[in-house]
Amino acid sequence: NNRFRNNGIQIFLGDWEWDGRFCNGITITNNIIYNAPGDSGSYQSITFKGINSGTLLNEHNTIDVGFDQKAGVMSYSTGSANNNPDTAAFRNNIVYASDVANVDDDIHSNNLYYNSTGVPAVETGKITTDPLFVDRATGDYHLQSGSPARNAGANLGYTLDFDGVAIDSTPDMGAFQY
């Protein structure tokens, strides 16, 4: 559970130069990754390079780096022999005003994308409407009672959200349960 604000590359695992450093068995969950409205900063929120094997999971994150930024999510660069995870999944996330890049090989399900580009054409449980955050301008990414992200996630076996609130069998999308 982390809160990342106004950084260059907020979560970067691997090796930029492909020098034989690899990431295996990685799970990124319950994170808030954002830029304050009007601020610049992050241009890649979640980046993995050099995924040799194992799993790569991006689940229950809330990402809002701003539409003018480069990539809200960049799981790994395709086309490289160094990138061949056994399982790569992007599930139960909220992506707001951000670009989704280089995640074509991931398993996508139950994500909410609002005012975002690069969104997968086909995805089980995909929602593309406003997630109705409590107060995006102040960085409060909790969900309002009428949020379409409520009870719209897949049960992935997690028990607690970002705040330590219990996750039931019909979880919400994003880092916070209502």
Image (cartoon, rainbow, N blue to C red):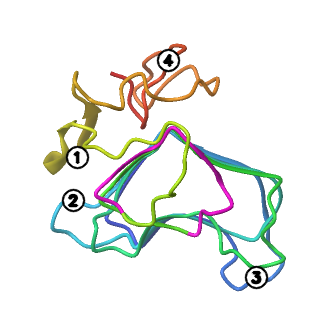
- Residue appearing at x 55%, y 46% in the figure: 123
Q: Position of residue 40 (x, y in %)?
A: 25, 73
Magenta residues, as a range? 102-116
Q: Residues within 10 Å of mark 4 (few under 14, many from 20)?
A: few
N-terminal-most mark, 1 or 4: 1
Q: Are marks 2 and 1 in contact (CB under 8 Å)?
A: yes
Q: Extreme bottom residue here?
A: 17
User: On residue 123, which mark appears?
Assistant: none
Q: Is residue 134 above or below residue 88?
A: above
The residue carrying mark 1 is 139
**Measured Cα–Cα span from mark 3 to mark 2:** 32 Å
The residue carrying mark 3 is 18
- In the rendered structure, the answer to whether residue 54 lies left or right of residue 107 reads right
Q: Position of residue 31 (x, y in %)?
A: 46, 44
In the picture, residue 132 is in which quadrant? Answer: top left
- Residue appearing at x 39%, y 27% in the figure: 163
The residue carrying mark 4 is 170
Q: Amino acid at mark 3?
A: Trp
Q: Secondary structure at mark 1?
A: loop
Q: Position of residue 23 (x, y in %)?
A: 76, 61
- Residue appearing at x 66%, y 55% in the figure: 106
Specify whether residue 59 is painted magenta.
no
N-terminal-most mark, 2 or 1: 2
Q: Amino acid at mark 1?
A: Gly
Q: Viewer-proximal residue, 149 or 36?
A: 149
User: On residue 36, which mark appears?
Assistant: 2
**Measured Cα–Cα span from mark 1 to mark 4:** 25 Å
Q: Nearer the viewer, mark 3 or mark 4?
A: 4
Q: Is residue 1 visible?
A: no
Q: Amino acid at mark 4?
A: Thr
